[in-house]
Image (cartoon, grey):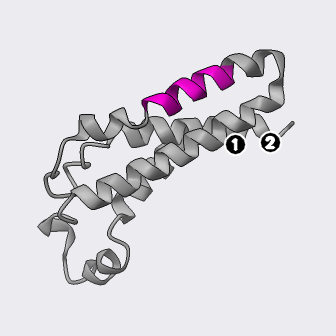
């Protein structure tokens, strides 16, 4: 039980930060393609599930692990949708020193930001 609360908190904070930058993380990525709101509506039942699991965890604390798993899954799906909707990193990131890194890992800035802020909160 000792690791469930911190792991669930980190997963939930990752979901929150991923939702905040779901519009494509404009400083680092080209403008989005497609409608973000329609895409996020797919996650609405999962958000209700997270809320229900949090309520259940009041009576049965190990259920908090389920909220963490669903939060992490939703955050990773949001990351994948951002990757599919954007045109890749902006030109100022593609310097000769970094072009190989961003060609290999195009979502590096998104991952660094979301994971960094999540661990900073945690």
For the stretch drawn in magenta, the main secondary structure is: helix
Disc 1 and disc 2 in contact, CB within 8 angstroms: yes
Mark 2, Cα crowd under 10 Å, few <14 / some 14-19 / many 20+, is few
> Would you say residue 40 is visible in this rendering?
yes
Q: Nearer the viewer, residue 53 or 27?
A: 53
Residue at the spot x=43%, y=57% of the render? 112
Q: Is residue 53 left or right of residue 44?
A: right
Q: Is residue 35 left or right of residue 4?
A: left
Q: Which mark is residue 3?
A: 2
The secondary structure type at the circle numbered 1 is helix
Residue at the spot x=67%, y=25% of the render? 53
Where is residue 28? Give x, y as percent.
23, 57
Residue at the spot x=44%, y=51% of the render? 77
Mark 1, Cα crowd under 10 Å, few <14 / some 14-19 / many 20+, is some
Q: Nearer the viewer, residue 107 or 117?
A: 107
Where is residue 40? Give x, y as percent.
34, 37
Q: Report, in whole angstroms, how far the alpha carbon at label 1 lies from the one at label 2.
A: 6 Å
Q: Is residue 9 above or below residue 112?
A: above
Q: Which mark is residue 104?
A: none
Where is residue 9? Give x, y as percent.
64, 35
Q: Is residue 47 left or right of residue 68?
A: left
Q: Which residues are magenta?
A: 44-54
The quarter of the rendered structure image containing the C terminus is: top right
- The image quarter containing residue 19 is top left
The quarter of the rendered structure image containing the N terminus is: top right
Where is residue 79? Give x, y as percent.
39, 53
Disc 1 marks which residue? 7
Q: Is residue 120 above or below residue 52?
A: below
The secondary structure type at the circle numbered 2 is loop
Q: Nearer the viewer, residue 8 or 122?
A: 8
In this view, which residue lies farthest toward the right? Answer: 1
């Amino acid at each position: 039980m000792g690791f469930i609360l911190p792991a669930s908190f980190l997963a939930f904070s990752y979901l929150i930060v991923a939702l905040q930058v779901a519009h494509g993380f404009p400083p680092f990525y080209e403008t989005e393609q497609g409608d973000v709101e329609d895409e996020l509506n797919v996650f609405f039942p999962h958000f209700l599930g997270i809320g229900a699991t949090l309520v259940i965890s009041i009576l049965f604390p190990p259920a908090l692990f389920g909220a963490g798993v669903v939060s992490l899954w939703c955050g990773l799906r949001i990351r994948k949708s951002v990757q599919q909707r954007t045109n890749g990193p902006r030109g100022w990131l593609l310097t000769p020193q970094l072009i190989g890194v961003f060609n290999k890992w195009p979502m590096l800035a998104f991952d660094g930001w979301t994971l960094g802020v999540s661990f900073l909160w945690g």
